[in-house]
Amino acid sequence: MILPLPGIPNKVLRRAYGIVDRALENGMDVGLDFIPYVLGNTTVTQLYPPWSLEGGTEALLRRLGDPGERARIRRDVETVTARWPHWEPGSWATNYIKCLGWKMLSILSVGSEKNRHMEGRRIVDLAREAGKDPFDFLADLTIEEEGSVVFLMGIPPRPWSEKVFLKGQDHPQLSVGADVLFPEKGSPPQTAYGTFPRIIQHYVRELGLYTLENAVHRCTGMAASRFGLEDRGVIRKGAAADLVVFDIERVRDKSTYDDLRHFPEGIDFVMVNGRLVLDQGDYDAGALPGKVLAR
């Protein structure tokens, strides 16, 4: 997935696209996908260096509780830059905190009722109120919640923040993904509510980057084909009847970076496996026609 982060220059993305293009020219089957926001979501464990996760979450919690190991983890979080290949000892594919900075991290969900008030708030603000630096606040919260914390990472979409992001939108192998974690409690990220409506609203209607047909294909058939799902993402005899009816002039993403829980507008009907689940705004909560898809 290509997700431009603040501080990543154009030349890095150009180099990444160049690698993909050379692979395609050499006959390799390579795909790309993107999120139409300059943000992402992840679990708290992914904010720590890979070596600290050896042995699983329980081992991480023990290390965070040991002063010497905590100091070592802090040093890596503050100093280690991304290095590939990420499977080599000492490498780290993405040090989110060093790349983004503490101000870009907000809590989406926690496992306990005690800390539910933290959901939707930034780490830097919570740490200041607790009289701790952000790292110690994060480490203490990780221990207290036994690793059950999900974060929103990134910045609200703005024209300047999308500038780098829009450079490679015309790549023929680029499909659309939502990259959503649905926490057991708390809200999923903005991408859960608005990814595909935003493609139509912003990328087709407002920016004119795609035709409607091309945008729909990137969200459906192209994405399904990457997983070998031949009966999904297309309208034809014998394919699954997964259909969405929307008004191109009305469809829009209503969720925002600061106010996530809003369903989109402009979608009139949704059919899953031939069963109508959304009818002119009326959602049939008892309809469960979906199933796990396997290649």
Image (cartoon, rainbow, N blue to C red):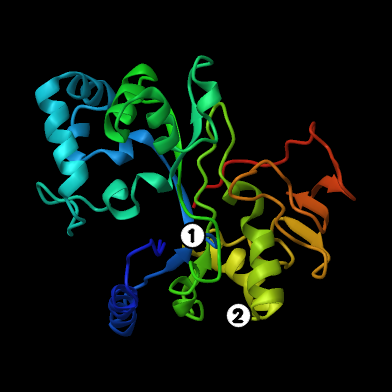
Of callouts 2 and 1, which one flags the residue occurring earlier in the amino acid sequence?
Answer: 1
Question: What residue is shown with label 1?
Answer: 38
Q: In this view, does 153 lie above or below 141?
A: below
Residue 234: quadrant of the picture: bottom right
How would you rate the neighbour count of disc 1 (Cα within 10 Å): few for under 14, some for 14-19, many for 20 or more? some
User: Which is nearer the eye, 65 or 146?
Assistant: 65
Q: What residue type is labelled 2?
A: Leu
Quadrant where the N terminus lies? bottom left
Question: What residue is shown with label 2?
Answer: 209
Residue 3: quadrant of the picture: bottom left
Give the x, y percent position of residue 200.
69, 68
Q: Which residue lies furthest to the bottom in this view?
A: 25
Q: In this view, does 203 lie to the left or right of 181?
A: right
How would you rate the neighbour count of disc 2 (Cα within 10 Å): few for under 14, some for 14-19, many for 20 or more? some
Q: Residue furthest right?
A: 280
Q: Which amino acid does label 1 sit on?
A: Val
Numbered tag placed on residue 189 in the rendering: none
Say if mark 2 contacts mark 1, CB within 8 Å: no
Circle 1 SS class: loop
How many numbered dots are placed on residues in this image?
Answer: 2
Q: Distance between the residues labelled 2 and 1?
A: 17 Å
Q: Is residue 173 left or right of residue 270?
A: left
The nearer-to-camera label among 2 and 1 is: 1
- The residue located at (26%, 20%) in the rendering is 58
Q: Is residue 295 left or right of residue 212?
A: left
Give the x, y percent position of residue 193.
65, 48
Give the x, y percent position of residue 266.
82, 59
Give the x, y percent position of residue 159.
55, 71
- The residue located at (36%, 17%) in the rendering is 144
Circle 2 SS class: loop
